Image (tube, rainbow, N blue to C red):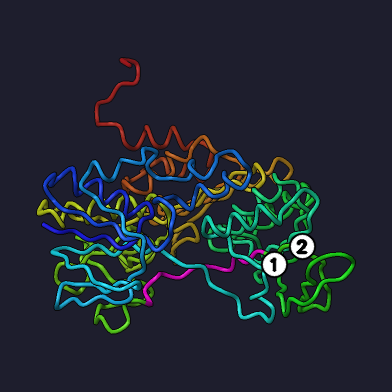
Amino acid sequence: MRHVIIGAGPAGAVAADQIHQLDPDADITLVSAEPEPPYSRMAIPYYLIEQVGEEGTHLRKDPAHFGQRRTQVVHDSVESVDPAGHALTLRDGGSLGYDRLLIATGSQPLKPPIPGADRPEVHSCWTLADAREIIRLATPGAKVVLIGAGFIGCIILEALALRKTDVTVVESDNRMVPRMMDDTAGAMIRNWCESKGVTVHLENRVDAIQDGRNGHSVAVHLADGRALDADLVITAVGVKPNTAFLDGAGLDMDTGLLVDRQLRTSAEDIYAAGDVAQGIDFSTGQYAVHAVQPTAADHARVAASNMTGHPQAYHGSVNMNVLDTLGLISSSFGLWMGRDGGDSVQLHDAERYRYLNLQFEDDRLVGASALGLTEHVGVLRGLIQTRVRLGKWKARLQEDPMRLMEAYLGSTRPIGYNAHVL
């Protein structure tokens, strides 16, 4: 059986290993569009702060890992896919045939339509090549403008601060991390960042990046008329699934590649996993793209099982994010913004940077967000993912949201359970 995997990120690497484990005689080809060994983008911030070298970003530390598992790594880009012919065309010429194909091409960063965004001082922070340029330019004391204060932007912010650069953040929304935090928590993150010496401009945008002044490489012009001196500009305004090479392939797409519960696309013998796949959302039952590494790995295992004839259903991904912003941990799970008609409760301690928001539907916890609280991250996810009925514990949580562990034990332990016997 010939298995081809397009994309050598976490989803592709996990799928390759899983296919080999389930079918040791299978021939596997892993196609990577980058010249490096398969690596994790989530490790790039650690590379930026020199906590790891480039090899520390590699998904498999042994250079012989894939070869020992009948997996050939091909460094090339895929130009097109022919589902009817079970083949794909490569950029550098030639083609690959397959019996089963997994598309795991992940996401690509959005490029803001800003005049001057193509200057050599402007970078995204997405690839190892990007990271090398950022390391060259982000020297101690350098002025850096970070466009975007979402999840990826705040991860980059952490690394820039640790490199002792002078960072200014520009965000068009009214709060930081708007896709995982509400107004209250987003404002608290802003206050925290400013207390650490970061300048934050909210509800503003960059209109142009022009020649520098005052000895700096560029001037970043904002919509409110201000101009910011910068030696480096980093854009982090969002990502989109990497699907351009599939134009004309006839696969069903929306935001990403639509997949069923087996991670199959609309074409026979083609599967998708990770950021490129738009699958079932656990909380809503609708189709969504969850661009996080745990979802990519879960997708990969299920897709590989089905590709090798071991039927397995995917029960949906839980929207989940955990973020460290200059030492302040924030997290969100499920329907953190709530459901229409549902109940909620908040704990808000601005001075201690502690916040907890619980969202209920009937007597089930369906979403949560937290700031400065890490001890109950697993409990929050567990209560949401098990859909357990809280019963009397809902009212107790509404009185004191910090009783999460008690609520978890009280609502999930078997009938007749006696704590005294433990």
Query: Horizontal placement of 208 versus 315: left or right?
Result: right
- Alpha-carbon distance for marks 2 and 1? 7 Å
Residue drawn at (32%, 65%) of the image: 277
Question: Residue lying farthest bottom?
Answer: 248
Check if residue 356 falls in the magenta segment.
no
Q: Amino acid at mark 2?
A: Asp
Q: Amino acid at mark 1?
A: Glu
Q: Quadrant of residue 93?
A: bottom left
Crowding near pointer 1: few (<14 within 10 Å), some, many (20+)? some
- Of mark 2 and mark 1, the one earlier in the sequence is 1
Q: Nearer the viewer, residue 23 or 398?
A: 23
- The residue that label 1 is drawn on is 121
Which numbered marker is on residue 231? 2
Which numbered marker is on residue 305? none
Secondary structure under the numbered disc 1 in the rendered image: loop
Magenta range: 234-244
Contact between labelled residues 1 and 2, with CB atoms less than 8 Å apart: yes
Instruction: Say above or below: 239 vs 364.
Output: below
> In which quadrant will I find the N terminus?
bottom left
Residue drawn at (19%, 72%) of the image: 87
Question: Residue 142: horizontal and vertical position, in percent?
Answer: 78, 55
Question: Residue lying farthest top?
Answer: 421
